[in-house]
Image (cartoon, rainbow, N blue to C red):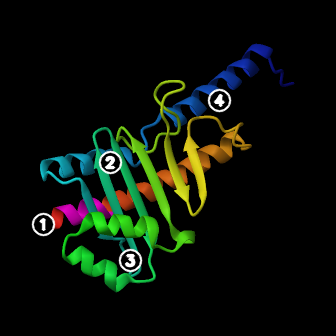
Amino acid sequence: MHCHRPDSWLSGIALCAVFATAAVAQEPKSAAPARELSQLLSAKKLESIAARMPDSREEFVGALAFPGQLMVVWAKTTAPAVVNEKLIRKDYREVYIDLNSASIVESRHFVTDLGPDGIKARPDQKQGPADSHDVATKTMRFDGSWREDKMSEADYLKAHAEADAAYARALQALIDELKKG
């Protein structure tokens, strides 16, 4: 006969809570590329950078760097030849502006990375400023308030993981552009 003791059941719940907390506390995939991009921009004394996204002729990414913040946008454009010309001229700020204003809205992603240390699932300090990811016209603030967003915690963490992975990919395209020369 198999007997379940209440204390072992409670231990199991506590262990699950520890693992869930550890998953949220884990460094985002985008953390290292965000730091690297910030360092490269600073070393080259640049405030903006832009690039073509890997494996796409119509999707581009642009970033503006401010002290303690990265703003990154990536999207498809209806005029890739025009954007490509701006890339060739290294007119990165113009590419960034075009992606914010003249891109295909349904394909547009916009990240505000405060740190910049990658998209965190929750701010370091309760009630602190939160990273955000906009897709098309929908904004997702990663402030840890999934209930306010009418989501389950699992859906919130899934949305964070997807945003983090996409952001890491966009950052890598920018890093590769900076390292080209």
Toward which corner of the image does residue 51 lie, by quadrant?
Answer: bottom left
Kindly indicate whether the residue at mark 4 contacts the one at mark 2 (C-beta within 8 angstroms).
Answer: no
Asked whether 23 or 89 is in front, the reply is 89
Give the Cα separation between the discs numbered 3 and 1.
20 Å
x 72%, y 42%: residue: 152
Give the Cα separation between the discs numbered 1 and 2.
19 Å
Check the image and report above or below for 178 versus 3.
Answer: below
Q: Which amino acid type is shown beneath numbered disc 2?
A: Ala
Check the image and report above or below for 73 versus 15.
Answer: below
Of the two numbered discs 2 and 3 in the rendering, the one whose residue sits closer to the viewer: 2
Quarter that holds the C terminus: bottom left
Of the two numbered discs 4 and 1 in the rendering, the one whose residue sits closer to the viewer: 1
Quarter that holds the N terminus: top right
Task: Return the residue at label 4.
Answer: 16
Task: Return the residue at label 3.
Answer: 55
Kindly indicate whether the residue at mark 1 contacts the one at mark 4 (C-beta within 8 angstroms).
Answer: no
Answer left or right for 151 relative to 61. right
Look at the magenta stretch and give its main secondary structure. Answer: helix
x 34%, y 57%: residue: 171
Circle 2 packing at 10 Å, graded few (<14), some (14-19), many (20+), is: many
Circle 3 packing at 10 Å, graded few (<14), some (14-19), many (20+), is: few
User: What span is in magenta?
Assistant: 173-178
Task: Return the residue at label 1.
Answer: 181
Q: Which amino acid type is shown beneath numbered disc 4?
A: Cys
Q: Earlier in the sequence, mark 2 or mark 3?
A: 2
Task: Return the residue at label 2.
Answer: 34
Q: Which amino acid type is shown beneath numbered disc 3?
A: Asp
Q: Position of residue 88 (x, y in %)?
A: 20, 77
Q: Which amino acid type is shown beneath numbered disc 1?
A: Gly
Helix, strand or loop at label 1? It is loop
Check the image and report above or below for 96 versus 144.
Answer: below
Of the two numbered discs 4 and 3 in the rendering, the one whose residue sits closer to the viewer: 3
